Image (spheres, helix red, strand yellow):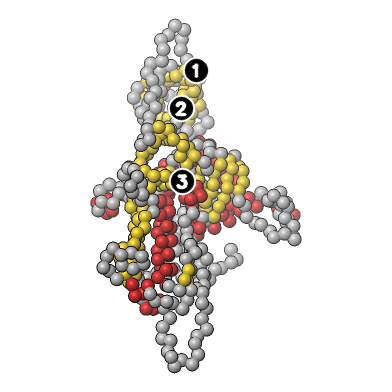
Amino acid sequence: MALTIGAGGLDLTPSSKKQVTPASYLSDIGFVQQYLPDTYEKEFEKYGNRTVSSFLRMVGAEMPTTSDLIQWSEQGRLHLKYSGASTTAGAGSDSAEFTGLTDNAIRVGQTVVISDEGSAASAKGIVTASGASAITVAFYDADGLPTLVGNVTIFVYGSEFAKGSGGMEGAVEATPEIHENNPIILKDKYSINGSDMAQIGWIEVTTENGASGYLWYIKSEHETRLRFEDYLETAMIEAVPSEGNDSGAGAAGYKGSEGLFHAIEQRGNTATGSFDSLDDVDAMVARLDKQGAIEENVWFVNRGLSFEIDNLLAAQSNNGSTGSISYGLFDNDRDMALNLGFSGFRRGYDFYKSDWKYLNDASMRGGIVGGAVDGVLVPAGSTTVYDQVLGKNAKRPFLHVRYRASETEDRKMKSWIVGSTGGAANTDVDGMDVHFLSERALCTLGANNFFLFK
C-alpha cells in the first residue's frame, strides 16, 4: 500500500458539556478595546451531518406493543435430516444400526440416503427399526454398507411398503420455534438555568434538524435530542441480553435486550476475512441457498468492505487487459467522470450495496479493532410469522421495532419539560429540564437469512 495516512486531525474529545458555562460565550470584550475582532457570525459545520441513525428507517418498520415480552414463532425445516450419526457395522453389511440421532423422528418404512461426511461414499436403504436416537437401515445395494471414514449424514427421501401391509406407524409433529425479546427503557435529559437561557451569544448556531439562533442553549437542547434519537437506533443494533443473575448487569436487575448483531451471531450467519474473488461470493450464496433463499438482499457496509466489493466486481471487466473499463450502464470514456463504485450486482441473488455511516463514524464503530463489524447483509421484504399476542399469522418486515404504547400512553418517543422557564411552569426551579424517554425492542425475524461480516 503506497498511501500512508498521517496522525492527527481526528478529534474524538467530546465537545458536549453537562451544562452551559460562561465559557460557552464570547467574553472579555472591553469598552476600551480599540478594534473589535472580525468574527464569523455562523458556526462552521466541520463534521457535516453528525447523526448516524437511518438504518432501521430504511429496512424496517415500527409498530406498538402492550407487553413486557414480545414472542413470535418461526417455521422449522420441513424435511428430516440428521448429521453426525455413526455405526459400528463393517463395510459390506446388509444392514446397519446408526446412532446419535438426537430427537429421532425417522419412522419404520421410510427410505433414506446415507452419506459419508468424510468421503464421497453413500448408500440408500429402508428403515426397519427406529428408536429415540437410533435407526436400523437395510440397504438396497447388494454391496451393502460402503466403507466409511467418518460420521454420516442421513436424510429421508420417501417410503416403501409391501402389498397388504398396514399404514405408517407414528406421526411427525411440527415443533414450534419460539423466539422472544423484551423492550428496554432509554432515557436522556438536558438541563439549563433560566439566566443562561436569557443570554445572547455572538455566534449563530445550527443543528442537523434545522434549529438555529443566537441562543446557545437551543443548540445544546437540540443536540441532546439528536443524540438520543441516534441512541434509539444504535441500542437496537448493539443490545445484548443479560445472562441471568450470573452477570453483573443481570444481578442488578437489568435484563438487556437482543440487538441485531447479537441475533445474527446466535441465529444467523457470520463471516470473517475479505472478498478476494468470486469464490468468496459463491460461498456466501451457497450458504444462503441452505437458508431462506431470499431473492433480494441489501448489503450495509463500512468503507473498507465497500471498496473490497467494488474492486472485486471491477476485476470482472472483460476489458481489464487493455486498460479500459467498461462496467456500468454505459461504457466509460475519458470525457466522463469515472465511477469506480457499484450499487448492486446479481450472483444467484440480487445484492444491493449501501454505505452504513454508523460503521464509518469515528465517534461510533468507525476505526475500532476489537469486535469490529464490517457490514451486515439484510434480506429485503417481509415474512409471515405467528404473532403470539394477536393469535394469528401476520406479515412483518424481517427487521422491525416494537415500542410500548396503549390508548393512554405512547412511549415511542416521549419528551417533556420540567421547570419554570421555556414554556413550563410546574416547579419553582429557576431553569428548565427537558426529558426524553422511549421503551422499545428490535425483532429480528428469520435471522438465518442475515449475514454478519467481521
Q: Secondary structure at mark 1?
A: loop
| Residue shown at the point (49%, 87%) measured from the top left | 36
* Residue where numbered disc 2 is placed: 79
- Cα separation between marks 1 and 2: 22 Å
| Residue shown at the point (47%, 66%) measured from the top left | 211
* Residue where numbered disc 3 is placed: 61
In the image, 345 versus 2, the foreground residue is 345
Q: Are marks 1 and 2 in contact (CB under 8 Å)?
A: no
Extreme-top residue of the structure: 164
Return the x and y of residue 249 as percentages of the image width and height: 28, 53
- Note whether residue 189 is visible: no
Q: Secondary structure at mark 3?
A: loop
In the image, 230 versus 292, the foreground residue is 230
Image quarter where the N terminus lies is bottom right
Q: Are marks 3 and 1 in contact (CB under 8 Å)?
A: no
Q: Image quarter for residue 418? A: bottom left
Point out which mark residue 140 bears.
1
Residue type, numbered disc 2: His
| Residue shown at the point (44%, 31%) measured from the top left | 77
In the image, 185 versus 78, the foreground residue is 185
Q: Residues within 10 Å of mark 1 (few under 14, many from 20)?
A: some
Q: Earlier in the sequence, mark 3 or mark 1?
A: 3
Q: Secondary structure at mark 2?
A: loop
| Residue shown at the point (47%, 58%) measured from the top left | 52
Residue type, numbered disc 1: Tyr
> Above or below — where is 149 with respect to 198?
above
